[in-house]
Amino acid sequence: MRKGIVLGIMMCLISVANAQYDAKAKAILQKVSSKYESMSSYAVDFVNKLHSPLAGIDEETKGKATIAGEKFRIELEDHLIIVDGKSMWTFMKEDNEVNISEFEPDESEVNPSNIFKMWEKGYKYRMLDTDAINSIKHNVIELTPEDKTNQIFKVKLWINPSNNTIKKWSMFEKSGNRYTYIINKFNPKPTITTSTFKFDKT
């Protein structure tokens, strides 16, 4: 009797562990990482949606991003962000003001240069159902941080199985805020110049 109970508990624990680190989800995520790591750079046109129930905000912003390794450039309607791998420039267009800071992201922090590989460390992952975007079925994978103090408690990725690219992702905060990014255009071979990741003071 006691052996049966112990065996049952062990089977439950194994089942939970498999759900936390889903083998099918891992196989898909590995393909995604390989896809992006094989590219020296890429660029996207995207839509950023913010849903904040407490603040009563539902807003949408269009933008463009160019990524090359640890460097990235994000152009939004009201500001510009440039990261050269070491420093970050945040230019507020309306105020004609720029803030400069060191770029030292935490491993669990989501940014354009690590969204495709953030699952590799500090996150549990599991496969959800498929979801159609523009009539194309996408695999949906849920990531949850192992660090329970993380303000973000869940990230969902929509992955195109035909080319292993991320079409959409949503980040859910404990505050109730939800940030969603939708990729409308993907360019695997953008034009990169010496000025792409440098802030022009003029």
Image: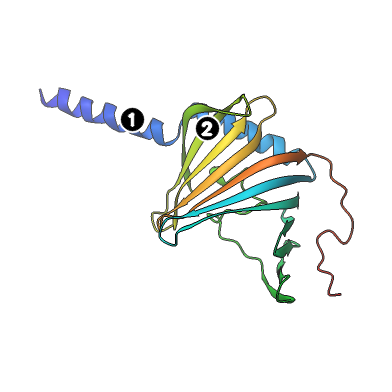
Above or below residue 19? Residue 49 is: below
Q: Name the residue rendered at 64%, 37% in the picture.
A: 167
Compared to residue 58, the image places residue 35 above or below, namely above
Residue at point 74%, 51% (across, down): 64
57, 68: nearer the viewer:
57
Q: Position of residue 4 (x, y in %)?
A: 16, 22
What colour scheme was applied to this rendering of the protein? Answer: rainbow
Distance between the Cα atoms at labels 2 and 1?
23 Å
Amino acid type at mark 2: Val
Q: Which labelled disc corresponds to residue 123?
A: none
| Mark closer to the observer (2, 1) | 2
The kind of residue on which mark 1 rests is Ile
Name above or below for residue 179 compared with residue 102: above
Relative to 31, is 4 on the left or the right?
A: left
Quadrant containing the N terminus is top left
Residue on which the image places disc 2: 140
Q: Residue at x 69, y 64 (%)?
A: 78
- Locate residue 200: give its quadrant: bottom right
* Residue 38 percent coordinates (x, y): 76, 38
**Residue position for label 1:** 14
